[in-house]
Image: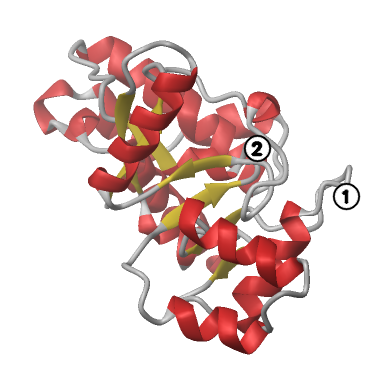
Amino acid sequence: MKVYHGSYKAISIIDLSKCEKHKDFGQGFYVTRYRNQAEDWAEKIGLKNDTQGIVTEFEFFESAFSSWNYKVLRFEDYSDKWLDFVVLNRNPNNENPVHDYDIVEGPVADDKIQRRLNKYLNGKISKEIFLNELRYHEPTHQICFSTQRALLMLENKSKESIDHLFNIEDIGEAIIEALMLDKKFDEETASKIFYSSGIFAQLADESTGFYKKKWQEIYELLKQGLNLINAND
């Protein structure tokens, strides 16, 4: 799935430590499937930083929701649970993260909603009234990547590897890192598994065109092979 991030500059390296705290789903890197929403964010933050906002496009690998060992929270729409979660994360008195999810997906508490949210928090309107008003709000969407491991599921579309050998090197580094984070292998073990696999042999053979695949797809194939080996042990 294509997703977008609006900012005052193009994003090449994601540094979670520089991401703002106390946002809807906590500190993390946020994207949306709606490009117009990202463009609005880019325009607003661009004005604040006296620059022209820029939208960076990413590919999000939705297998993160199913075949990876991620801790995920998803809100289909505005709801009681969504509101409680947002209020908890936006509380400035919470100095430490209030959840340990890798990825959180759901609607946005934008500027208009934020004004109503403040009234709810100040006791001027009830939770029922607040949530009822949200039924008529235009659709919004955001995904928050809260951990370094979760960022493996994002690929910057502005980065295109055109050299075969360089692409193998990039794929190898990503897969080894994924094995270390996902399977808890040390670097030596992860490297040995990758470079001794049939997957690497296919990557090294330029005629197969295997190196043109997304590294996440290649990693899924490698994991399947590892599962078969374990099952036969």
Q: Residue at x 53, y 25 (%)?
A: 14
Q: Residues within 10 Å of mark 2 (few under 14, many from 20)?
A: some
Q: Position of residue 82 (x, y in %)?
A: 61, 73
Q: Residue furthest left?
A: 207
Which numbered disc, 1 or 2, marks the residue that appears first in the sequence? 1
Is residue 104 among what the camera can see?
no
Q: Specify whether 93 is left or right of 110.
A: right
Instruction: Find numbered disc 1 in the image and state the secondary structure of the residue it sits on.
Output: loop
Front residue of 82/192: it is: 82
- Which residue is nearer to you in this view: 19 or 225? 19
Q: Is residue 184 left or right of residue 40?
A: right
Q: Report which residue position mark 2 lands on.
A: 180
Q: In terms of image quadrants, where is residue 73?
A: bottom right
Q: Position of residue 186 (x, y in %)?
A: 72, 32
Instruction: Give the residue displayed 32% in from the left and 28% down from the top.
Output: 56
Task: Determine the residue positioned at 72% across, 45% down.
Answer: 22
Where the C terminus falls, by quadrant?
Answer: bottom right
The part of the image, by quadrant, that contains residue 202 is top left
Residue tagged 1: 94
On the image, the x and y values in percent for residue 163 come to 20, 10
Q: Which mark is residue 83?
A: none
Identify which amino acid the numbered label 1 is placed on: Asn
